Amino acid sequence: MGWDADFSKRAQNGELTVGIIGLGYVGLPTAVGFYDAGFNVWGVDISERTVRMVLAGENPTGDPDVDDIIPDSNSPRWHITTSASEAVPHCDVVLVTVPTPVTEELKPDLTYVIDAGRSVFESIVKGMRTIVVLESTVYPGVTAQTWLPLIDELCLEVGKDVEIAYCPERFNPGDPAHGVRQVARVVGCSNSYVGEDLVALYRRLTSDDVRYVGKLEVAEAAKVIENVQRDINIALVNELARIFPELGVDVEDVLSAAATKWNFHRYTPGVGVGGHCIPVDPYYMMQRAADVGVPAELITAARAVNRTMPLHVATTINEILYKAGVPSGSAKLLMLGWSYKPEVGDPRETPAEPLAEALLSKDIAVFAYDPHIDSSQFPEKVTVVEDITTASGFDLAILVTAHNSCVNIDWKELGKRMRNPILYDGRRVLDLDLISKMGWQVYAVGKPH
Ligand code: SAJ
């Protein structure tokens, strides 16, 4: 099996076995997607808990879009295991969807990519020309740099025992309109015949555009800069959100006015940029640029603006509390939302964390309400509020995540229970005129005090 002249036809007929290594936010929906498209699927995860839950039809990820879509483990086309060595020999194609976080020093952490690659290549049946596709976000050059030495070490031969390719995941948690069945893909591979045949395979998965873009590095670079561009765009509006209040101008008024121009792209300032994509991927590009001696000055500067937004907001809030006469060391603050984005329960890189740390360092007691986040996922020093309808005694409430459950609360009743009814809209989504008529003092990121 593996790649041969009939691969494209077998892809079109669903006569391939697809392996997915890593059954997380991206891998599990991908495995389900290929199963639903009619393929024979082997899903592999090192976590016994994940395998156990998936086999029981339960969703081990935090993404509600994955609820209720997991196939029956009795299906002859659905195999879930912790063992790559069991799965890989059955597979024509193996997709690797493992995390690529950054270290504490903000350097790319490729251990998952290396370990997953090794577990696959060790299990390859020689002569099968199994195609191994990396989908995780990396910087240009990583797939070849990490996997080719492993292939050599195991005395495998590209073009005979194995083929490698790169097809970046573009999965957007909590956004069913851009799930694995709907989102456009690009494929990079040094062998154009293999690349074009992988296009035929991915076209069975997604209804959107799929194209071969050339060598691995082109597809690796495309994915990284997609998110770098987003980080820079958000950094621009966050920097403007610091400037315009000093000019007595609300940045949201300016951005809405500018957005009347046909090619102005509207972004929204906020308390910060979270998630496992946007605040992480720029460091990959920065690392690669440093490797080749061309400093990524704009990318680095944009990252710094976004990383320091939580500190900027904490300083502003401290000033607001001081002006309100709240005695230092006695203030109690309520954070509405903890997750990095609305309607998902994902605390990864959430700006809520550095915001809470900055507030606590100013002797402000921090309480947090987020029905999407399990109470065990909050830092110890943050007091979890389980029921917003009884929460009381706070000096300031800040909207950190625009969950419906945090935006559509009974502001009038909460105002009555506040010690000081002061509100800070950290996501610029609230009707502050209406809420101020309910007796709240209202502030917001990018809005003049
Ligand atoms: N954010 C802002 N202002 C904005 C947009 C976002 O402050 O105008 C913040 C969000 O609050 C969040 C962070 O940035 O904390 C990231 O938001 P996001 O909407 O980019 O959400 P992600 O991280 O889930 O990004 C994903 C990415 N998808 C993939 O990597 C496959 C990204 O490339 C998509 O553009 C994005 O979803 C999307 O379009 O929703």
Image (cartoon, grey):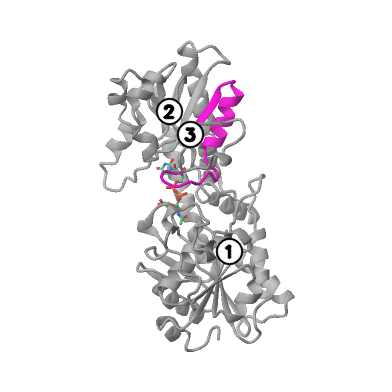
The answer to whether the residue labelled 3 contacts the one labelled 1, judged by CB atoms less than 8 Å apart, is no
CA separation, marks 3 and 2? 36 Å
Tell me where the magenta segment starts and ends, as one range.
341-368
Q: Which secondary structure lies at badge 1?
A: helix
Q: How far across and how far down the image is residue 440, in percent? A: 35, 19
Measuring 54% from the left and 30% from the top, which residue is drawn there?
311
- Labels 1, 2: front one: 1
Query: In the rendered view, would you say 404 is above or below 18?
Result: above
Q: Local crowd at mark 2 within 10 Å, few (<14), some, or many (≥20)?
A: some
Which residue is farthest bottom?
5
Q: How far across and how far down the image is residue 419, in percent? A: 44, 16
Q: Is residue 440 magenta?
A: no
Which of the numbered marks, if any, corresponds to residue 51? 1
Name the residue carrying label 3: 386
Name the residue carrying label 2: 243
Q: How far across and how far down the image is residue 355, in percent? A: 54, 32
Query: Which amino acid lies under the numbered mark 1 shown in the image of this protein?
Result: Val
Query: In the rendered view, would you say 22 is above or below 260?
Result: below
Q: Which secondary structure lies at badge 2?
A: helix
Query: Which amino acid lies under the numbered mark 2 shown in the image of this protein?
Result: Ile
Which of the numbered marks, if any, corresponds to residue 207? none
Q: Local crowd at mark 1 within 10 Å, few (<14), some, or many (≥20)?
A: many
- Between residue 121 and residue 45, name the one nearer to us: 45
Measuring 46% from the left and 43% from the top, which residue is drawn there?
372
